[in-house]
Image: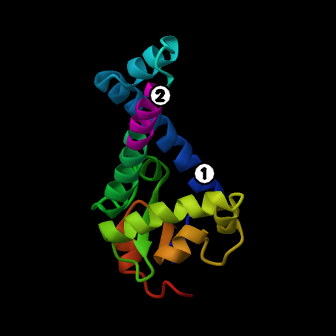
Amino acid sequence: MVPFGGFWWRVLAYLIDYIILQVALSVLGGIFGFGLSVSTYMADMQDPDAFGPAFAGLFGFMFIAQWLYFALMESSKFQGTVGKLAIGLIVTDVAGQRISFGRATGRYFGKILSGLILCIGYIMVAFTERKQGLHDILAGTLVYKTRDPHEVAEGADIFA
């Protein structure tokens, strides 16, 4: 039986993803001029109302980029983000199959809820039988400690 991905493995995978996202978003922000526009508006406070749209644009860009990163990677043939792949974790549905983009999107937005309630949704991973966080339960997903998705799909009894 393939073991579930535990709390600390998932934390380590997220730290890797966080670093990758920050570097990528910094580069893209520089290319599109988000950093420059925010600092320009901060320096030139003759029009303080101009800061709001610049900040909203930056926040919107970062939010969409993170959502697409997690949802596209977890629903791809790799079944995990770069951080999860580096650690050897995959995301599946409860039957051990690859998840759809819609389910991966639901899982991503469920992570927001997991964080809003004092991160209890994330801490649940350490205490639930199948190592599921609130976002996993809501999306009907499991995280396994394996690099080969076929091990899970061909596993004898994933509910044992």
Please give left or right for residue 114 compared with residue 40 in the image.
right
- The residue drawn where x is 29% and y is 23% is 31
Name the residue at the top extreme. Answer: 43
User: Which one is nearer the viewer's eye here, 102 or 11?
Assistant: 102
Looking at the picture, which amino acid does disc 1 mark?
Val
Whole-angstrom CA distance, mark 1 to mark 2, is 39 Å
Nearer the observer: mark 1 or 2; the answer is 2
- The residue drawn where x is 40% and y is 43% is 60
Q: Which residue is mark 2?
A: 49
User: Which one is nearer the viewer's eye here, 113 or 99?
Assistant: 113
Q: Which numbered marker is on residue 11?
A: 1
Percent coordinates x, y for residue 32 in the rendering: 29, 26
Residue 154, compared with residue 78, is above or below; it is below
Q: Decide if residue 47 is in sight here.
A: yes
Verify CB contact (< 8 Å) between mark 1 and mark 2: no
Q: Which residues are magenta?
A: 49-60
Q: Is residue 55 magenta?
A: yes
